[in-house]
Image: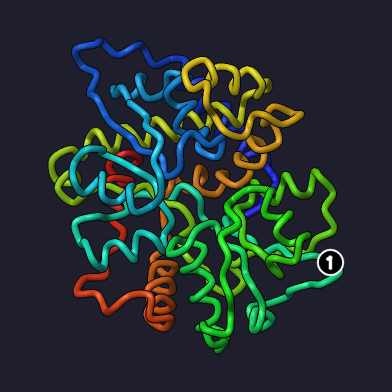
């Protein structure tokens, strides 16, 4: 996932920026309102939609997007199914888990392809694979969420009894390291951005991606099947707005200006109260988003199959009557 930019990427990014500047403003009467729910508040991790808003890329594609901060994957699914929000974002495993119970929710695009979650341990007491989890305590972002699902999937894949591993909520933040330092956990799971902060703090750690053992769709945009039928154009415009914003960001020379523009409208963005004001996280996020931007948010069916099969094996879900957790319909409408 850490692909270095090549000349094609820069040319494409430049083209995206140039095209966005040539698009005339959409008349107010033509603008369609869309409500989007983030999975967890206004984290800097979700800059792709906040800048699509403050940078004018949604409006240039004919939609006005109201962005609200969510409180977890369960809320994201519930609000989308209820019709209170057109789009939200959640983990691939969270979507599968929800869709088995509530088939009216479906993924329409993959915004973050791989290597989202990482396992961190101390160099002095390294945890090198899921087999090393047995008899240890693992720190998770939350109980019952994506990190616990992925933990159970890795244990099932490697034949480690689930009840041989203790679990502790350490959150998705660099503060999880304190749990490790105090001996409350032997290892913990955090997202890539938190790994970046820990690296900046020069923590003596061993880090590896969960995708080595449980490759699944990382982060996806979701909607309801009702909205899929009734508002496909609004959904397509949402994807185009995000894609245009990312393209402009790859050509942007002043990311501090971008962060400032987001803070004017979203002053409570978490992740900017660090020495570099969040620049490292945005750069890291752009690196992570690059494959999805390059592939226009396509999602590999093999990833969904692996996720479903591992979740069955781990007894996280029951067999599903329908396994079409992802549809390419909106992406094709947006990008051809």
Relative height, residue 327 to residue 154 (above, below) = above
Q: Position of residue 49 (x, y in %)?
A: 44, 32
Q: Is residue 299 left or right of residue 230?
A: right
Observer-nearest residue: 89 or 247?
Answer: 89
Q: Position of residue 109 (x, y in %)?
A: 37, 49
Where, by quadrant of the figure, is residue 227 drawn?
top left
Q: Is residue 171 left or right of residue 67?
A: right
Where, by quadrant of the figure, is residue 255 drawn?
top right
User: How many dots with numbers?
Assistant: 1
User: Which of the colour schemes (rainbow, by chain, secondary structure, one colour) is used?
Assistant: rainbow
Q: Position of residue 191 (x, y in %)?
A: 60, 53
Relative height, residue 192 to residue 93 (above, below) = above
Neighbour tally class for label 1: few under 14, some 14-19, many 20 plus, Cα within 10 Å:
few
Q: Residue at x 19, y 56 (%)?
A: 104
Relative height, residue 101 to residue 276 (above, below) = below
Where, by quadrant of the figure, is residue 319 drawn?
bottom left
- Dot 1: element: loop
Query: Which residue corresponds to mark 1?
Result: 123
Q: Residue at x 50, y 67 (%)?
A: 148
Observer-nearest residue: 199 or 133?
Answer: 133
Observer-nearest residue: 19 or 172?
Answer: 172
Quarter placement of the C terminus: top left
Q: Residue at x 55, y 89 (%)?
A: 159
Quarter placement of the N terminus: bottom right
Q: Residue at x 43, y 34 (%)?
A: 242
């Amino acid at each position: 996932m850490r692909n270095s930019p090549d000349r094609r990427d820069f040319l494409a990014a430049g083209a995206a920026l140039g095209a966005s500047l040539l698009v005339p403003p959409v008349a107010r009467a033509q603008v369609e309102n869309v409500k989007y729910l983030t999975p967890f508040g206004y984290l800097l991790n979700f800059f792709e939609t906040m800048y699509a808003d403050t940078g004018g890329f949604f409006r240039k594609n004919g939609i006005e997007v109201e962005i609200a901060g969510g409180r977890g994957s369960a809320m994201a699914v519930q609000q989308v199914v209820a019709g209170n929000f057109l789009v939200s974002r959640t983990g691939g495993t969270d979507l599968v888990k929800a869709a088995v119970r509530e088939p009216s929710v479906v993924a329409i695009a993959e915004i973050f392809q791989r290597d989202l979650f990482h396992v961190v341990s101390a160099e002095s007491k390294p945890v090198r694979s899921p087999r090393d989890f047995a008899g240890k305590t693992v720190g998770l972002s939350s109980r019952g969420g994506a990190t616990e699902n992925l933990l159970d999937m890795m244990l099932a894949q490697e034949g480690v009894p689930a009840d041989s591993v203790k679990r502790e909520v350490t959150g998705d933040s660099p503060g999880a390291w304190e749990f490790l330092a105090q001996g409350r956990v032997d290892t913990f799971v955090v997202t890539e951005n938190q790994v970046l902060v820990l690296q900046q703090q020069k923590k003596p750690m061993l880090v590896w991606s969960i995708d080595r053992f449980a490759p699944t769709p990382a982060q996806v945009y979701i909607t309801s099947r009702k909205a899929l039928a009734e508002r496909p154009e609004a959904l397509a415009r949402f994807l185009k707005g995000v894609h245009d914003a990312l393209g402009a960001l790859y050509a942007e020379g002043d990311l501090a200006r971008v962060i400032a523009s987001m803070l004017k409208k979203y002053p409570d963005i978490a992740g900017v109260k660090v020495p570099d004001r969040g620049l490292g996280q945005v750069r890291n996020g752009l690196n992570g988003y690059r494959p999805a931007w390059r592939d226009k948010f396509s999602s590999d069916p093999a990833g969904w199959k692996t996720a479903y099969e591992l979740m069955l094996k781990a007894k996280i879900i029951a067999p599903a009557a329908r396994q079409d957790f992802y549809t390419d319909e909106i992406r094709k409408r947006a990008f051809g």
